[in-house]
Amino acid sequence: MSNRAHNFCAGPAALPASVLQRAQGEMLDWQQRGVSVMEMSHRHQSFMDLVGQAEANLRQLLKIPDNYKVIFMQGGATAQFSLLPMNLLAGKAQADYIDTGIWSTKAIKAMAPYGRANIIGSSKQQNYLSVPQQSDLQIDPDSAYVHYCPNETIGGLAFDFVPETGDVPLVADMSSVILSEPVDVSQFGMIYAGAQKNIGPAGITLLIVRDDLLGKARFDTPGVFNYQQQWQNDSMLNTPPTFSWYLAALVFEWLLEQGGLANIGAINRAKAAALYAAIDSSSLYVNNVNKANRSLMNVTFTLADEALNSLFLQQAEANCLLNLKGHRSVGGMRASIYNAVPMASVEALIGFMQDFEHQHWS
Ligand SMILES: *Cc1c(COP(=O)(O)O)cnc(C)c1O
């Protein structure tokens, strides 16, 4: 594995090397069946057993209460921006949205054909460097749900609290933060996450839905996009992305082997703390996000002299430190340090950043 690069890609992101090795070993002959897992029926008992165990492991990792259903769909988190109002508006005219950056804005825009997105809090005026406070949030009891993005992947901005929304169900786009630390699922009406940051490869989307929110879809919601119908069909209303599901199952096993989310969360906090400390102690690298709202998963930073950006990226790549370029909409740098990125990669990045600063700046 010495030729594995340090991969800071925001998504599709790094997968644990041991998971990839296991998939490699099982590629031609899964469970002594003489075929790979992606060359067999999704209704075969052995595949059904695989996904049953995957759900049990996920439930154990996140301590998902029994009254929450686990559903897998396609279309990524972006599809969910539209499927959410289709499934949850339930005849209401509006839902509440919190605006903290690019992903929450996309969710707000996608709401337009279905109803009114009532923006109950926004940090746009603060350039998305902080999040609205609980006391700022004016939750409307006539709203079908409250939507927010606990971790804005592009801005590197994270909530340091779970909004209290009373009787209005809270819906969270956890695409870039799911499984990175323990969460109390019972605080949410629904959680969704595209897989390609912290779950597995692209192509599958996880939904965790409180059961009283099922069965409220608009009449014109296609069956494959209907939460209740997918749940009733074991997320197999049509052919699911079997290989992505299989790899997600291997990642859940790997997370349990790492000691579960409490352990993973402690490692993630240590990784982020080391990287932010390196940024804060330097005069070249800058992160202006309010300290309490700094993302543990997506560490953004700019260089005090932007003219050094391309040299930084070029030399980083030459040192096997990949995908550090910030999102095209915001520029700068971003190091995504999801579960599968080990502390050793963070240390290699810090060492490189310090060397680069000594050579080209101070
Ligand atoms: C990556 C990401 C998305 C988009 O995911 P797709 O699978 O490309 O649709 C949405 N929300 C957040 C928070 C993300 O990080």
Image (spheres, grey):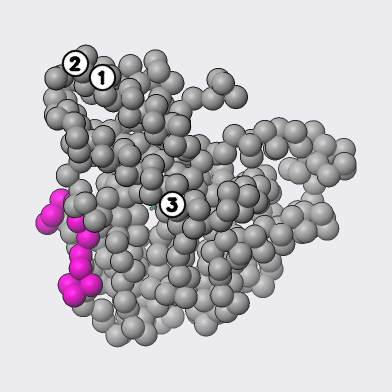
Residue 113 figure quarter: bottom left
Q: Is residue 218 above or below residue 174?
A: below
Amino acid type of the residue tagged 1 in the rendering: Phe
Q: Name the side, left or right, on which 83 lies relative to 232.
A: left
Q: Nearer the viewer, residue 289 or 342?
A: 342
Q: CA distance from mark 1 to mark 3?
A: 29 Å
The magenta segment: 125-136
Residue 66 figure quarter: bottom right
Task: Look at the numbered discs 2 and 1 and tell me whether their residues touch, using CB distance below 8 Å.
Answer: yes
Label of residue 356 in the image: 1
Q: CA distance from mark 2 to mark 1?
A: 6 Å
Q: Nearer the viewer, residue 145 or 318?
A: 318
Q: Position of residue 44 (x, y in %)?
A: 82, 55
Q: Quadrant of the N terminus?
A: top right
Name the residue tied to disc 2: 360
Q: Is residue 207 above or below residue 139?
A: above
Q: Secondary structure at mark 3?
A: helix
Label of residue 266 in the image: 3
Q: CA distance from mark 3 to mark 2?
A: 34 Å
